[in-house]
Image (cartoon, rainbow, N blue to C red):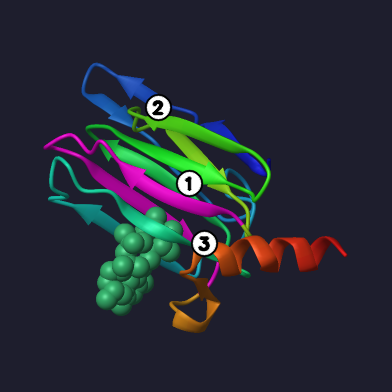
Amino acid sequence: MEYKIIDFQQHGDNRGMLVALENSKEIPFIIRRIYYLYNTGKNVRRGYHAHRKLQQILICVSGSCVIHLDDGVQTAEITLNKPYEGLYIANNMWREMYSFSEDAVLLALASELYDESDYIRDYQEFCRYVQEQKN
Ligand code: T46
């Protein structure tokens, strides 16, 4: 499956901690957009889509949440709970996000501007699409 956990370098001293992220260094694409999710309800599950082109890095900068990934063949559940850890997600990957803690802030670094036509929001369509890509 095309995802990976990236451990970012932490710059810490007696004042606290800092993580710095730069294009083409820690982030394997040019960042064209940043957004973040917060105040997500306790029992909410969101996402339910894949992207044709978009690559992303998700960082739970506060609290915790779980990311469900599905590439049409395999699935994975990844808990994000460290502000120095990023989850890289390639394109063509179905994702759902759940188990948000009350204080969760999920930051997303995205390779593309917002484009609704890049979304596949139907799971059966996603399975057909990834199969077509392989043929
Ligand atoms: C993803 C997961 C992790 C915008 O207007 N601009 C934006 O850049 C985004 C991301 C969303 N929106 C609007 C579109 C919807 O009316 O914000 C509303 C909520 O978006 P959505 O339902 O897509 O949110 P999630 O949590 O299901 O998914 C989001 C991202 O869309 C998606 O790319 O990978 O977070």
Q: Amino acid at mark 2?
A: His
Residue located 13% across and 37% down the image? 103
| Rendering coords of residue 96 (x, y %) | 40, 49
Tell me how far mark 3 sits from mark 1, CA to CA: 33 Å
Residue 50 position in % (x across, y down): 53, 62
Figure quadrant of the N terminus: top right
Q: Which is nearer the N-term, disc 3 or disc 1?
A: 1
Q: Position of residue 90 (x, y in %)?
A: 63, 53
**Left or right of 98 in this view: 68:** right
* 114 lies left or right of 71: left
Q: Quadrant of the C terminus?
A: bottom right
Front residue of this view, candidates 123 and 134? 123
Label 1 belongs to which residue?
Answer: 21
Q: Is residue 32 above or below residue 4?
A: below
Contact, CB < 8 Å: mark 1 with mark 2? no
* Residue corresponding to mark 2: 11
